[in-house]
Image: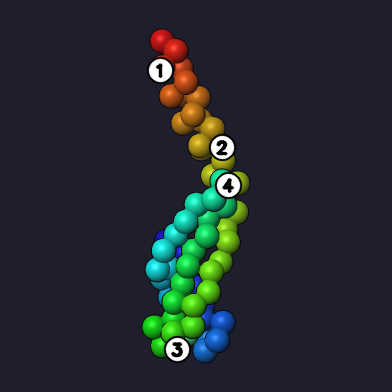
Amino acid sequence: MITDSCPSCTTRGIAPAETRTRGDRAVDGYECPNCRHAWATVRDLTAYSELHARRAQRRTRRSAA
Ligand SMILES: [Zn+2]
């Protein structure tokens, strides 16, 4: 979980209310508990792509065997 700072009132350490994954990107939706400002940040998940690829390979091998 990655916390963010409110772009409106600069409250720090706000946890995402929801996280959605779109392909190789994750969209974290935030709502500031202080001023109720809502925003979203997009994170690139390509740093994890190697891990996903390894898991996919393992699954493919198992189903093939
Ligand atoms: Zn705020």
Mark 4 residue type: Asp
Query: Could you classify mark 3 by the number of other residues whose Cα lies within 10 Å: few (under 14), some (14-19), or many (20 or more)?
Result: few
Mark toward the start of the polypeptide (2 vs 1)? 2
Q: Distance from label 1 to label 3 (Cα)?
A: 51 Å
Q: Distance from label 1 to label 4 (Cα)?
A: 24 Å
Q: Residue at x 39, y 83 (%)?
A: 33
Camera-side residue of 27 and 55: 27
Spot occupied by residue 56 in the image (x, y as percentages of width and height): 49, 29
Give the number of the mark in front: 3 or 2: 3
Q: Which residue is mark 1?
A: 62
Mark toward the start of the polypeptide (3 vs 2)? 3
Is residue 34 placed above or below 24 in the rendered structure? Answer: below
Give the number of the mark in front: 4 or 2: 4
Mark 3: is the Cβ under 8 angstroms from ligand 1?
A: yes
Q: Is there a contact, CB below 8 Å, between mark 4 and mark 2?
A: no
Query: Could you classify mark 1 by the number of other residues whose Cα lies within 10 Å: few (under 14), some (14-19), or many (20 or more)?
Result: few
Camera-side residue of 55 and 34: 34
Q: Which residue is mark 2?
A: 50
Q: Which mark is residue 26?
A: none
Q: Secondary structure at mark 1?
A: helix
Mark 2 residue type: Glu
Q: Which mark is residue 24?
A: 4
Say which quadrant the N terminus sits in.
Answer: bottom left
Q: Secondary structure at mark 3?
A: loop
